[in-house]
Amino acid sequence: MTNIFKDSRRDLRERAFQTLFALEFGGEALDQAYFAYTYDKPIDEETEVDLPSFLLSLVTGVREELPQLDSQIEEKLKEGWSLSRLIMTDRTLLRLGLYEITSFEETPGRVAINEIIEIAKKYSDKTSAKFINGVLSQFVTDEA
C-alpha cells in the first residue's frame, strides 16, 4: 500500500474535524476517517489507501480522551455555559484543538489554535472563531 496523496497537516486537521463531526451521528471511526480522507480524491475501487497516522492519531485520541477533554473545556466556559449549549461544530473544534495542544508537543500551542481557527472560519462563522480562540488560548502559556 502506498500513500498517493500529498497531505498538509492543515488538510489532515480538517479531515479529522470532518470525521469527528460525522461520528457525532454514529458510525465507525475508521470508516468515517476513510470517507473524510478520500471523498474528494480520484481513486478507484482497487486502489488501497493508507490513512495518514496524523489523521488517525487526532481522531482516535479525541475519541479516547473525550471525557477529559470535555471536562477541561467545561472548566474554561463562562458560568452558565456548558458544552451541550454549544453548536456541534464549535464543540468538535474545541475538542480537536485542545487534544492537539495537550498531546502533540511538536506543535506549538499557538499554531494548533490558529489552525483550528482557520477551520472554524470555513465551517462556522467569525463569532465562533473568536469564541474558540478565547477558550483554547486559556490552555496555552506564552513561550518566552
Image (tube, rainbow, N blue to C red):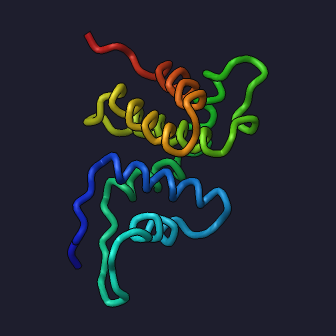
Say left or right for 17 vs 103: right
On the image, the x and y values in percent for residue 140 come to 41, 21
On the image, the x and y values in percent for residue 73 come to 60, 30
Residue 90 occupies quadrant: top right
Residue 103 occupies quadrant: top left
Residue 126 occupies quadrant: top right
On the image, the x and y values in percent for residue 79 come to 74, 17
Residue lying at the far top of the rendered structure: 144
Image quarter where the C terminus lies is top left
Going 65% across and 28% down the picture, which residue do you hit? Answer: 74
Q: How many marks?
A: 0
Taking 21 as reference, is 1 above or below it?
A: below
Going 65% across and 56% down the picture, which residue do you hit? Answer: 24
Say left or right for 91 vs 84: left
Say left or right for 115 vs 77: left
Taking 121 as reference, is 17 above or below it?
A: below
Taking 79 as reference, is 55 above or below it?
A: below
Residue lying at the far bottom of the rendered structure: 46
On the image, the x and y values in percent for residue 105 come to 30, 34
Going 25% across and 66% down the picture, which residue do you hit? Answer: 5
Residue lying at the far right of the rendered structure: 80
